[in-house]
């Protein structure tokens, strides 16, 4: 289908853009991730928490250090369009 083709094209582009060694994947969304926001620990300059939204309206809060989903929120009836970590 057209949607599957588009996902394959995006995946190929991302693979070329991210030429660094792959560290991990945060698996869990049922549909494509449409937005992402990351909070950093100012003193250690490491990622602490991330929020991701997907095309099916699901929002997930991630503990980046543990590489685990802390919370799942069914936020919308359509695609999540933005995420912000304060």
Image: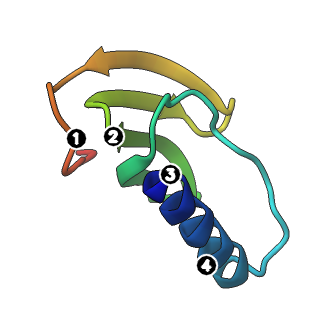
Q: Nearer the viewer, mark 4 or mark 2?
A: 4
Q: Give the distance between the C-alpha atoms of the residues marked 3 and 1, in whole angstroms.
A: 19 Å
Read off the residue under disc 4: 13
Q: Are marks 4 and 3 in contact (CB under 8 Å)?
A: no
Residue 85 position, x and y percent, is 28, 45
Q: Left of 59 or right of it: where is 61? A: right
Q: Residues within 10 Å of mark 1 (few under 14, many from 20)?
A: some
Nearer-the-camera pick, 45 or 33 = 33
Q: Residue at x 64, y 33 (%)?
A: 27
Q: Nearer the viewer, mark 2 or mark 3?
A: 3
Tell me the tag on residue 53: 2
SS category of the residue bearing label 1: loop
Residue 51 position, x and y percent, is 38, 40
Q: Are marks 1 and 2 in contact (CB under 8 Å)?
A: yes
Read off the residue under disc 1: 79
Residue 10 position, x and y percent, is 54, 69
Q: Give the distance between the C-alpha atoms of the residues marked 1 and 2, in whole angstroms.
A: 8 Å
- Residue 41 visible somewhere in the drawing: no
Q: Give the distance between the C-alpha atoms of the residues marked 2 and 3, in whole angstroms.
A: 23 Å
Tell me the tag on residue 1: 3
Q: Are marks 4 and 2 in contact (CB under 8 Å)?
A: no
Tell me the tag on residue 8: none
Nearer-the-camera pick, 63 or 6 = 6
SS category of the residue bearing label 3: loop
- Residue 46 visible somewhere in the drawing: yes
Residue 66 position, x and y percent, is 69, 30
Please report whichever mark, 1 or 2, sits nearer to the chain's N-terminal start: 2
Q: Residue at x 45, y 45 (%)?
A: 32
Toward the front, the furthest residue is: 1
Nearer-the-camera pick, 46 or 66 = 66
């Amino acid at each position: 289908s057209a949607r599957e083709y588009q996902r394959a094209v995006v995946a190929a582009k991302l693979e070329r853009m991210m030429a660094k060694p792959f560290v991990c994947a945060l698996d869990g969304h049922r549909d494509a991730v449409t937005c992402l926001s990351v909070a950093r620990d100012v003193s250690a300059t490491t990622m602490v928490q991330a929020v991701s939204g997907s095309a099916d309206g699901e929002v997930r809060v991630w503990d980046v250090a543990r590489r685990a989903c802390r919370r799942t929120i069914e936020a919308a009836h359509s695609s999540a369009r933005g995420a912000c970590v304060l």
